Image (tube, rainbow, N blue to C red):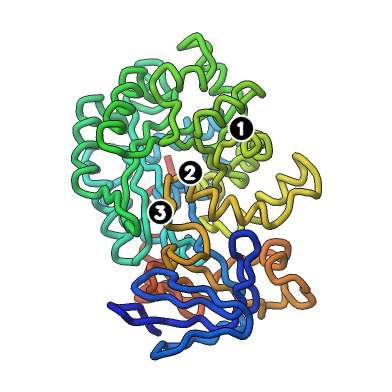
């Protein structure tokens, strides 16, 4: 299969099409060495010397997709009858009692399945927002780090938190929240053990209180201070629904973005999930501060949350990335499918001048900017060798004339090959080292524990 050990090089020769910054013609191919893209070649050019050559003339080559918002544990409650056909607050109220059953074994198998699904869709870096901590799940971040390392996929561990339960006027039940001291202490532990700030890092940590309606002001402030001290990113849900805006106005006397600023979160180390209900002035403030927004088109449509103003955010200077969101509000972990949904809802929101290249940019360069990473998200010399290779062999692509557009418009959903840090993690549509039948069976058994209330 080939992998780039010390000094070993792989030449990916003559791709059918390739997505590069500014449309640079790299159809000659890519030279990968030591996990990095060493050189791109124009048509007809090739490297000299001892290299392993892989013919990718059947493949459309993309930068590895970057998923900037997910909830892996929710793969266990997909299409649950207690929650389907509900909007966010009612959906959460229905599912919180089920998620309170989550155990370490549940989280492990859910993480393994979600990461495998994501990788098969072309994802090379995944950010998971885990904020449910029932008793016994203290090692959640360690479990996720282990599973990502076993698959060879980059991960951003979002040490989420909730400390505002029903008895305090929040939404979650008492059994899934923790106190602020416990949360902040574990945040420090997770950062010390898992956060790698170096270029090419496989594992990083972000601090991620769940939302304004599930954490206290004090925890928001304390988390921001800790992140600044440790050099970590910040992440939370914000402005997802009208209900959330109303909650903030009633409890805090201000809109969600004002609350974010008051608690020290209006910084370029912050990226937000959803960002649907911002007004014109708030869009400008986000851009000036450099706050990123992860657009979650599929989830926003499933929960009827609204339409993210992606164009205005980018025009204001705010990074826009892409995420699948939780697998109970999507209900899949397929970011290539999310790219297509982003294009479709974008055209409905704006017009046909929003293109497939915009949607692909959000899932690659835009997502990398949200995570504060300049080493991934683009096919360029010096970037990490994270690549997603798709073929156009299926019937759905027959007759397609523009290969890049075909991936989005004709509905590509599964990569043929995936490379992460110069190593093949998917070959011939199969994840390397994963028994998918066994994974499906084990995950299905675990999901039965959440089948009823």
Residue 360 in percent (x, y) is at 62, 56
Where is 89 relative to 197, above or below?
Answer: above
Give the labeled residue for mark 3.
Answer: 447
Q: Is mark 3 on a helix, strand or loop?
A: helix
Residue 82 in percent (x, y) is at 52, 39
Where is 393 relative to 217, above or below?
Answer: below
Task: Name the residue located 43 percent from the left edge and 64 percent from the top edge.
Answer: 382
Where is 57 relative to 265, above or below?
Answer: below
Picture disc at residue 165 = none
Give the labeled residue for mark 2.
Answer: 370
Q: Is residue 155 visible?
A: yes
Task: Name the residue located 25 percent from the left edge and 36 percent from the top edge.
Answer: 230
Picture disc at residue 276 = 1
Q: Is mark 2 on a helix, strand or loop?
A: helix
The residue nearer to you, when weighing 84 against 110, is 110
Where is 95 relative to 64, above or below?
Answer: above
Q: Do labels 2 and 3 touch, CB within 8 Å?
A: no
Among the two numbered marks 1 and 2 on one chain, the one whose residue lies closer to the N terminus: 1
Give the quadrant of the C terminus: top left
Task: Name the residue located 27 percent from the left edge and 30 percent from the top edge.
Answer: 226
How far is mark 2 from mark 3, CA to CA?
A: 32 Å
Residue 325 in percent (x, y) is at 51, 45
How far is mark 1 from mark 2, CA to CA?
A: 16 Å
Among the two numbered marks 3 and 1 on one chain, the one whose residue lies closer to the N terminus: 1
For discs 2 and 3, the disc positioned in front in the rendered view: 2
Local crowd at mark 2 within 10 Å, few (<14), some, or many (≥20)? many
In the shown orientation, is residue 167 left or right of residue 121?
left
Residue 51 in percent (x, y) is at 41, 87
Query: In which quadrant of the rendered view does residue 21 lie?
Result: bottom right
For discs 3 and 1, the disc positioned in front in the rendered view: 1
Among the two numbered marks 2 and 3 on one chain, the one whose residue lies closer to the N terminus: 2
């Amino acid at each position: 299969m080939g992998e780039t050990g010390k000094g070993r090089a792989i030449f990916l020769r003559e791709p059918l099409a390739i997505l590069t910054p500014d449309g640079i013609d790299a159809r000659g191919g890519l030279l990968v060495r030591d996990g990095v893209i060493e050189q791109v070649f124009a048509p007809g050019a090739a490297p000299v010397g001892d290299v392993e050559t892989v013919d990718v003339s059947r493949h459309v080559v993309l930068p590895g997709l970057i998923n900037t918002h997910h909830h892996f544990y929710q793969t266990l409650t997909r299409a649950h009858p207690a929650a389907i056909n509900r909007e966010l607050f009612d959906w959460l109220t229905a599912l919180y009692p089920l998620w309170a059953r989550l155990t370490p074994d549940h989280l492990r198998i859910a993480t393994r399945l979600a990461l495998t699904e994501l990788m098969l869709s072309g994802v090379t870096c995944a950010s998971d927002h885990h904020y449910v901590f029932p008793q016994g799940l203290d090692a959640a971040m360690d479990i996720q780090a282990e599973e990502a390392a076993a698959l060879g996929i980059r991960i951003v561990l979002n040490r989420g938190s909730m400390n505002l339960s029903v008895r305090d006027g929040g939404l979650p039940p008492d059994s899934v929240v923790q106190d602020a001291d416990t949360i902040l202490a574990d945040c420090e532990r997770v950062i010390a053990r898992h956060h790698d700030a170096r270029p090419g890092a496989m594992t990083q940590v972000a601090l991620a209180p769940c939302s304004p309606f599930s954490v206290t002001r004090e925890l928001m402030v304390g988390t921001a201070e800790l992140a600044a001290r440790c050099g970590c990113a910040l992440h939370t849900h914000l402005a997802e629904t009208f209900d959330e805006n109303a909650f903030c106005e009633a409890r805090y006397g201000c809109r969600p973005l004002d609350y974010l600023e008051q608690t020290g979160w209006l910084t370029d180390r912050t990226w937000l999930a959803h960002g649907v209900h911002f007004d014109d002035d708030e869009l400008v403030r986000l851009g000036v501060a450099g706050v990123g927004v992860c657009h979650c088109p599929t989830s926003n449509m499933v929960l009827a949350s609204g339409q993210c103003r992606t164009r205005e955010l980018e025009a204001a200077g705010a990074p826009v990335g892409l995420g699948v969101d939780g697998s109970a509000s999507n209900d899949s972990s397929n970011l290539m499918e999310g790219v297509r949904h982003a294009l479709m809802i974008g055209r409905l929101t704006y017009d046909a001048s929003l293109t497939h290249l915009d949607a692909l940019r959000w899932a690659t360069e835009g997502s990398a900017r949200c995570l504060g990473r300049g080493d991934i998200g683009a096919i360029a010399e010096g970037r990490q060798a994270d690549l997603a290779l798709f073929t156009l062999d299926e019937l759905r692509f027959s007759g397609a004339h523009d290969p890049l557009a075909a991936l989005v418009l004709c509905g590509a959903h599964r990569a043929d090959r995936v490379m992460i840090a110069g190593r093949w993690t998917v070959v011939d549509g199969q994840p390397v080292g994963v028994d998918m039948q066994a994974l499906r069976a084990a995950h299905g058994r675990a999901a039965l524990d959440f089948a009823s209330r």
